[in-house]
Amino acid sequence: MPKHTLPFSKISSKDVLKAGGKGASLGEMARAKISVPPGFVVLAQSYQDFVKANNLEMEILSQLKNVNPDDTNSVDRASNVIRDVIHDTPMPKDLEKELLAEFTRLKSPYVAVRSSATAEDSDVASWAGELDTFLYVTKDKLLDAVKECWMSLFTPRAIVYRFEKNLHDADVHVAVVVQKMVNSEIAGVCFTVHPVTKDPNQMVIEAAYGLGEALVSGMVTPDTYVVDKEDDLLLDVNIGEQQQMILQNTKAKGVQKTITKAVPVAERANSRAISNGRAKKENSTSSSPARSRR
């Protein structure tokens, strides 16, 4: 029986401390029978066990105590020391064995490996976008990618964020989501409640060409679609001019296998990433006629 991991189907919104915010959300969606690519979560406890078993806790705390968040050199120095220590410390053999076995179970040549902080989207802070994600990770690079996610708790950006949110003395741990990689032509984010007006009857879809990293990193301005959930109407469309997109880089080595390319001219300005019908399909399978305006 797996000790260090849980499949999405065994995780719920109550498991943020185990699976982090991202992992808990994926578990909740899987339980709701939403079409989520299969995967598993390397539990935050595995990171904690790794730190404690190798006596890294004192080294990490010592380095963070020496940080002056207003001094870039101080932040960089602590970041380099902590990440080097994590990188150079071997992962427990039983954890390695379990991760590779779970990867094999997914029956996918590539996975996405994403950090999922246990303090993610809390009342104090949202770690969304602060930690690292790795795409098109192969089995032989999985262990490296998981470690890189652990290390991303201590990038200069993450350390400064800790101080900004007064979390430098807090226990912030990280779980890691490992999920079957989807080679998307179009990707995006769906808000099931309008994020600005808070209208529970409206859903907002943001869409971008290529992989979703272009959107979540702020590299592009996505198309935005507002859908009425009750009447299945497309209420509003705002087209973002997208110059770039992120795609798989088949020639790359290491854990990061993506490349940034120009969006083909024919698909740029005034060309929707998704059609009216496709936007509505995200909402329901209703056959009612659609009205739309631009």
Image (spheres, helix red, strand yellow):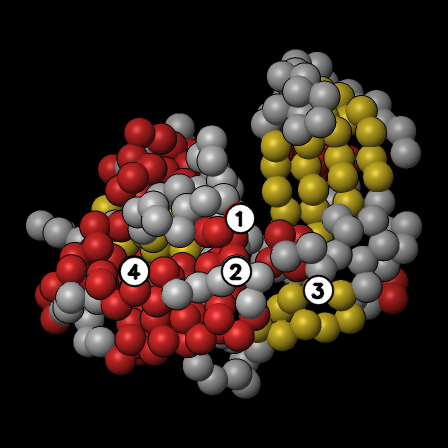
| Residue that mark 4 sits on | 61
Q: Distance of mark 4 from mark 3, alpha carbons?
A: 39 Å
Residue 192 seen in the current view: yes
Rendered image quadrant of residue 18? top left
Between disc 1 and disc 3, the foreground one is: 1
Q: Nearer the viewer, residue 197 or 191?
A: 197
Badge 3 vs badge 2, beta-carbon distance below 8 Å: no
**Image quadrant occupied by the C terminus:** top right
Q: Which numbered disc, 2 or 4, marks the residue that appears first in the sequence?
A: 4
Q: Secondary structure at mark 1?
A: helix
Q: Which label sits on residue 183? A: none
Q: Secondary structure at mark 4?
A: helix
Query: Is residue 89 found left or right of 120 in the rendered image?
Result: left
Which residue corresponds to the image point at 27% horizontal and 54% vertical from the top-left? 42
Q: Position of residue 106 (x, y in %)?
A: 31, 58
Q: Which numbered disc, 1 or 3, marks the residue that appears first in the sequence?
A: 1
Q: Position of residue 38 (x, y in %)?
A: 37, 49
| Residue that mark 2 sits on | 69
Badge 1 vs badge 2, beta-carbon distance below 8 Å: yes
Q: Residues within 10 Å of mark 4 (few under 14, many from 20)?
A: some
Badge 4 vs badge 1, beta-carbon distance below 8 Å: no
Q: Nearer the viewer, residue 178 or 76?
A: 76
Q: Which numbered disc, 4 or 1, marks the residue that appears first in the sequence?
A: 4
Q: Amino acid at mark 1?
A: Glu
In this picture, is 283 found above or below 255?
above
Q: Amino acid at mark 3?
A: Met
Q: Residues within 10 Å of mark 1 (few under 14, many from 20)?
A: few
Query: Is residue 230 found left or right of 101 in the rendered image?
Result: right
Q: Residues within 10 Å of mark 3 (few under 14, many from 20)?
A: many
Q: Distance of mark 4 from mark 1, alpha carbons?
A: 17 Å
| Residue that mark 3 sits on | 245
